Image: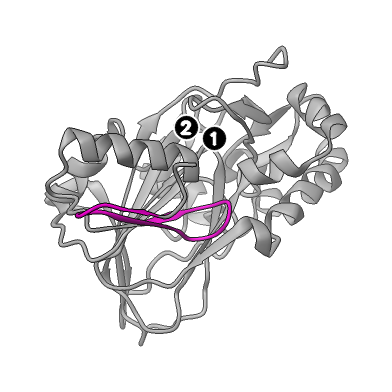
Amino acid sequence: MVGENFQTDEISLKPLTKRLGSSLEGIDCRHVDDATWATIIDVFHDRNLLVFPKQNLNPDEHTAFMERFGELDVHPQELSARSTLALPENPKVELMLNKPGKAGPRSAAWHTDVTFRTEPVAVTSLYGVQTPEACADTIWSSLRAVFDDLSPGLQETLRGLKAVHATAFVMGKSQAGSINYDPTSETDPKKKDLKAQYREEVVHPIVHRHEAGYDTLYINPAFVNRVEGWSAEESAPFLGMLYEQAKLANYTYRHRWSKNDLVVWDNRCTMHYGVNDYGEEDHRILHRTTGAAFVVTGSAYSNN
């Protein structure tokens, strides 16, 4: 299996958990030849989360590496009250900042990025410019592994279902939760214009057929309103059961940040959570990219 331990003269690959994530040491993301890139993609599709420690990337080098996964996106940052800031010198990189007097974004909730779009983003990265000690971890969960462990009967049921995704502009504060709802969106002209772009609900299959050939759950506690054809009240316990399963330790990887870590993950088959256990005295600066838009494709075993 690709994700198992291996080592060459240049590259050392180690699994982070049994079913999610690998660390690749010995790779300089500024200089990746075709053979090394082929290895990276194979491991990415197999393990769905990659950690590249000890990088030394400026914003342009960061985006150049991430553009090999697909075209980068400018994240719709005004959709959140805790919005990130685009770097002026490179707007494809978002600044996630926490320092005295400048509290930055804190997700503090499980989510997958921008699933409210018709074509969501497949790949997200975070680069540790400055990281505090012993706090501000990020946790990922493998929705692919969760799906694999469900009973065949439930898998078959899920393959026949779709979920309705929307921003908090559509769902409202009570359903969307604190991660997305921004009350200023009703009064701020710029945010009102953005709200108009994302006011429609979007429907995606609950089971996505990944390009690598496996099925995975594609659900999102932050942006899924309900199962298509069900009420929100009927959907909540059903989806909640899947979300709670995904939070179990055997499906997750918790990353303790070090300076110059680059973490890249597959939004098509994971969700993540930023641990909110740090204060303004804990200096934390991350650079984020999102991109590689894709179409959510139903399982080959369903009619989605």
Q: Residue at x 62, y 36 (%)?
A: 218
Q: Label 1: how many residues lie within 10 Å, few (<14), some (14-19) or many (20+)?
A: many
Q: Residue at x 81, y 45 (%)?
A: 236
Marks 2 and 1 close (CB-CB < 8 Å):
yes
Q: Secondary structure at mark 1?
A: loop
Is residue 243 rendered to the left or right of residue 57?
Answer: right
Q: Quadrant of the C terminus?
A: top right
Residue most extreme to the bottom:
281
Residue at numbered disc 2: 120
Say which of 190 and 86 sits in front.
86
* Residue 14 part of the magenta-drawn span: yes
Say which of 287 and 176 sits in front.
287
Q: Is residue 74 visible?
A: no
Is residue 171 rendered to the left or right of residue 19?
Answer: right
Question: Percent x, y for residue 230?
Answer: 84, 30
Colour pattern of the rendering: one colour
Question: Percent x, y for residue 100?
Answer: 31, 83
Q: Secondary structure at mark 2?
A: loop
* Residue 225 vertical position relative to residue 86 in the rendered view, above or below: above
Number of dots carrying numbers: 2
* Residue 181 vertical position relative to residue 220 in the rendered view, above or below: below
* Residue 283 vertical position relative to residue 154 in the rendered view, above or below: below
Q: Residue at x 48, y 48 (%)?
A: 185
* Residue 287 part of the magenta-drawn span: no
Residue at numbered disc 1: 116
Magenta stretch: give its range: 6-23
* Residue 275: assigned label: none
Say which of 34 and 115 sits in front.
34
Q: State the CA–CA distance, disc 2 to disc 1.
A: 7 Å
**Type of amino acid at the residue the image marks with label 2:** Pro
Residue 209 placement: quadrant: top right
